[in-house]
Amino acid sequence: MTPKDKKIGLWEAVAIAVGTMIGASIFSIFGIGAKIAGSDLPEAFILSGLFALIVAYSYAKLGSKIISNAGPIQFILNGIGDNVITGSLAILMWLSYVVSISLFAKGFAGYFLPLFHLSNTIMAVAITEAVLIILFTSINSFGSRAVGRLEFYIVLAKLSILGIFILLGFLTINRHYLIPSFGTAGLHGTLAAAVVFFLSYMGFGLITNASENMENPKRNVPLAIFISIGFVMLVYVSVSVVAIGNLSIPALISAKENALAVAAIPFLGSLGFILLSIGALFSISSALNATLYGGANIAYSLAKDGELPEIFERKTWFGSTEGLYITAALALIFAFGFNMEAIATITSTIYTIIYIFVLVSHYRLAESVGGKKNFILMNIIILFGVLVALVHYQWQTQRGALLLMGITLAGVITAELIFRYIGKRIISGSKNMPII
């Protein structure tokens, strides 16, 4: 057990979740949201936040009773047992962390090089990605307290920048830009954007992936989950109102990944562009930092229980860090060798699938961990509808990504079958994880 003075407190846990959530969406895919929802983007953020709260209800109940750095995979293990589905979800979750780290590294390079007027060459991008991942891997090797403290200050810096953007931007809003789009097309755009941005709240899950290293997890895990989602909802809605209120939708769409920096120019000028670009670098850094920590933790926890190759489990976590280093190394390989856009869409769908199984597990464990079964069942139905809507959106806009997702799922299931029945390994904690 980690000594008390090295454990993560409530606000450090909130910082880790907030850092991941804000970094994963506001600066990265805001322009895409404007393209899908138009002037209804604030409403889409609210709706996607409500979807996240549906999942958070089960995470909070389960996370306060089942303390494990395997997080949602341990919830599923307790709920439906050790089987091929659980093993496949475990591998998929770890791979989703690896891909997310790669995406953040690419996003950082995209902001960093233009801000400092550096040539955007393949070599320059690769060097930037490598230095960034190596830096945060080194920081993570010092343990959970170092991660929590660094995350707290990074989040504080970027939220200060966003605070300036929000406060000054509200003074120059053009209310005509914020008129909702009524009618079928507007509703369709809002729902589609809500489904896409639903996964921008997924960072709250990292709280459960650090529960073994938290102070008083029974109390702090649920608190951190709901505080982080509520705070991020407020930031998302406020930022979207300011951006849409100061810049036309066509201009936001044209700006793409630099949408917020461009939206600051009307009321802050070139200084605003620089300030928001710096905020983006802080944001992406904190997201990568938190995701690398969570990814390494889940890699170790799953390996310890027999779901990843034995190289991960040589020594106790924080005593030896093979899981951390291998997660970082694979992230570098993805960053150097692959186009992340299609894989990012696949990751979003995978997370929704995992969420559904978490809710199913909660339904089965409700008498032990608490929660109303009828309410959980209703949430499962809603979340399944979100998955259908997400797949439908991919079919309409990214059929190649949808095909690749199917191939990925088939490949992971095949690998799990081989790993389980030929390797003769099982998840050792599947029967006896205590419910406190």
Image (spheres, grey):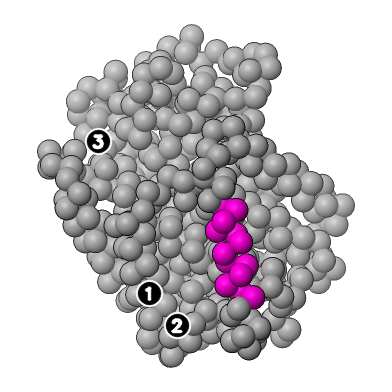
Foreground label between 3 and 2: 2
The secondary structure type at the circle numbered 1 is helix
Q: Can I make out residue 417 in this image?
A: yes
Lower position in the chain sequence, tag 1 or tag 3: 3
Q: At which x and y percent is residue 102?
A: 37, 56
Q: Relative to residue 436, is residue 267 depicted above or below? A: above
Question: Which labelled disc corresponds to residue 312?
Answer: 2
Q: Distance between the Cα atoms at labels 1 and 2?
A: 8 Å
According to the picture, the residue beneath numbered tag 1 turns out to be 326
Categorize mark 1 by other alpha carbons within 10 Å: few (<14), some (14-19), many (20+).
some
Direction from residue 38 to residue 427 in the image, left or right: right
Q: Which residues are magenta?
A: 405-417
Foreground label between 1 and 3: 1
Are circles 1 and 2 on residues that touch, CB within 8 Å? yes
User: In the rendered structure, which amino acid carries the disc numbered 3?
Assistant: Leu
Residue at screen point 47% across, 38% down: 235
Q: Main secondary structure of the magenta part?
A: helix
Q: At which x and y percent is residue 172?
A: 37, 16
The secondary structure type at the circle numbered 3 is helix
Q: At which x and y percent is residue 324?
A: 38, 74
Direction from residue 175 to residue 424 in the image, left or right: right
Residue at screen point 57% across, 56% down: 407
Question: Which labelled disc corresponds to residue 275?
Answer: 3
User: In the rendered structure, which amino acid carries the disc numbered 1?
Assistant: Ile
Q: Distance between the Cα atoms at labels 3 and 2?
A: 41 Å
The image quarter containing residue 47 is top right
Q: Relative to residue 223, is residue 312 depicted above or below? A: below
Lower position in the chain sequence, tag 3 or tag 2: 3
Residue at screen point 33% across, 63% down: 333
Q: Can I make out residue 11 in this image?
A: no
Direction from residue 315 to residue 362 in the image, left or right: right
